[in-house]
Image (cartoon, rainbow, N blue to C red):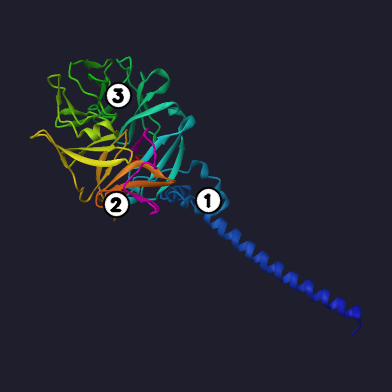
Amino acid sequence: MSLSHLRHSSCSLLTSMLSDTDDVCTDDQEKKEELERCWSDLPIDIIDLIRLSLFAGDSGAFNATCRSWRSTTTIFRPLPPPVDCPHHQSPCLMFIEKYGRCKFFHPIYNDFYFMEIPEIANARLRYSRFGWLLMSQEDSNTKNIFFFNPFTRIKIELPRIPFEDGFVSLCFTASPTSSDCVVMGVSGFLFYSVAMIRLGDQNWSVEDNDKKLRLAECHPILYRGRYYCLGADGNVGIYNPKDHTCDVILKPLETKVIESLRQAFFAEFDGKLLAVFVYGYERKVHVWRLNLSKMNWFPVQSLGDKMLFVSRGSSFVETASVSGMANKIYFPKFYGNSGIFYSLRTKKYHSYTGGFSSQTGHELRDFPLSTWIKPTF
């Protein structure tokens, strides 16, 4: 066989091989396109159901499924819906960044999600409950108060507040869509005043008093028909809306706690009032229960099967539905990008990822202007 004939045969063989390869590639491409057509032909309602069940990193796999799904990511819902799953029912920590960009931290996934909400740019979180936020405008000396639902984008304005210096803390008693919704705020440094308004009223009712109470920066609690306000020294202010009277329980904490208090949180726990005090350079944690019959503070050693979520905007107790989350306090603190909880069993701060464990928390990042909120749609 001549060299030219061999070269021609080799070229023919190579051409045939390349042709076969092209056929295989073409077949693979056709199968891929057919598979993408199967996914892209799904009804939009089915795609929405899939999308609503995703959270955090799952969205990446969703986007990679097919080209048409990638085009729908602009309407990807950034928080899990309230489905019948304990992972989705968990509260999220919310804080507002610049220009209305809101960050949500999910404690079970230990991950963040973001929402662009320009309606609340330059606003301050004051209180959260029933899936609603109570907010004030930072650029007007906190005189404008309004409700906002970050999941439905509904905004409800309230009359301008009656105090020149604004409120120290606020709370409300029911969803603002209910006629039972009453907003209560306290103001003052050494002597506290109370203002209340029922949704739909045009003016606040104000009660001044001569009771001395240095307010802690935590929200009041409506408990058995009375409003309780925690003082920075452990004293408790009580306001009775029926007879418009104010009183103060003088039960101060230890001097070392009062003089080095960093944070205070107030919550209701199994029909009792619970206070969490964080104090000292080490950020030590003390949990106390207020015994109203004896008017004394008693130390709490265990939360049992409960979880305590604390923040300046909202503090509350939930029953643990996920293994390993009970008997812990969930703070608005972070170690790197990992959330932080405090275990009443170990008496230590721990990161969710296990990379941090310490009796002191001074090196942790704190986000005081935040709130725990349960997503509602």
Q: Which is in the foreground here, disc 1 or disc 2?
A: 2
At label 2, the amino acid type is: Met
x, y percent for residue 62: 50, 52
Spot occupied by residue 352 in the image (x, y as percentages of width and height): 37, 51
Q: Amino acid at mark 1?
A: Asn
Q: Are marks 1 and 2 in contact (CB under 8 Å)?
A: no
Q: Residue at x 40, y 49 (%)?
A: 110
Residue 143 lies, in percent from the top left, at: 35, 18
Label 2 or label 3, whichever comes before in sequence order:
3
Disc 3: which residue: 168
Left or right, 321 with respect to 226, comes to right
Is residue 369 a member of the stretch shown in magenta?
A: yes
The stretch drawn in magenta includes residue 122: no
10 Å crowding of disc 2: few (<14), some (14-19), many (20+): some
Above/below status of 225 relative to 42: above
- For the record, the magenta segment spans 352-373
Name the quadrant containing residue 186: top left
Return the residue at label 2. Answer: 325
Front in this rendered view, residue 354 or 67:
354
Instruction: Please name the residue that numbered disc 1 is placed on.
Output: 63
